[in-house]
Amino acid sequence: MDLALVPEVDARKALAGRSLHLRVLAPVGGWLGVGRLRVLRTAEIGDRIELVCGYESFDRLRTGSGQARD
């Protein structure tokens, strides 16, 4: 089953009843995921399915002084 770029919620529904392991890729530092969380890769590992997901984009978090934070 090809789930690439499918929203994570829809992928979990399609895999209902299966044992899942969810990983979310994110940049290092202070970032906020924006948009839908989508499946980037699936892998069958033993008796479970691993979903590697990522947001459509990321916004850098700002400190109180307006400086970007890493």
Image (tube, rainbow, N blue to C red):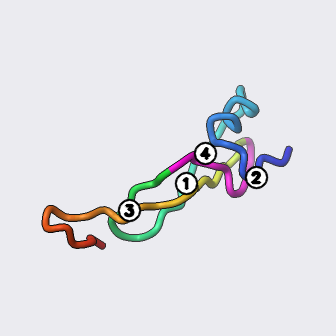
Residue at 33% x, 65% y is 30
Upstream in the sequence, badge 4 or badge 3? 4
Residue at 31% x, 62% y is 61
The image position of residue 47, as x and y in percent, is 74, 42
Left or right: where 55 falls relative to 33 = right
Residue 30 in magenta stretch? no
Give whichever of 19, 25 is nearer the camera.
25
The image position of residue 9, as x and y in percent, is 62, 35
Contact between labelled residues 4 and 1, with CB atoms less than 8 Å apart: no
The image position of residue 27, as x and y in percent, is 46, 68
Tell me which segment is drawn in magenta: 35-47
Q: Residue furthest right?
A: 1
Comparing marks 4 and 3, which lies closer to the viewer? 3
Whole-Å distance between the Cαs marked 3 and 1? 11 Å
Q: Quadrant of the C terminus?
A: bottom left
Residue at 86% x, 44% y is 1
Q: Which residue is mark 4?
A: 21
Badge 1 crowding class, 10 Å Cα cut-off, few under 14, some 14 to 19, many 20 or more, is some
Name the magenta segment's main secondary structure.
Answer: strand
Residue 37 in magenta stretch? yes
Q: Which mark is residue 4?
A: 2
Say above or below: 41 vs 3. below
Whole-Å distance between the Cαs marked 2 and 4? 16 Å
Upstream in the sequence, badge 3 or badge 1? 3
Q: Which residue is mark 1?
A: 55
Residue at 55% x, 54% y is 55
Comparing marks 1 and 4, which lies closer to the viewer? 1
Left or right: where 3 falls relative to 37 = right
Identify the amino acid type marked 2: Ala
The kind of secondary structure element at disc 4 is strand
Whole-Å distance between the Cαs marked 4 and 3? 23 Å
The kind of secondary structure element at disc 1 is strand
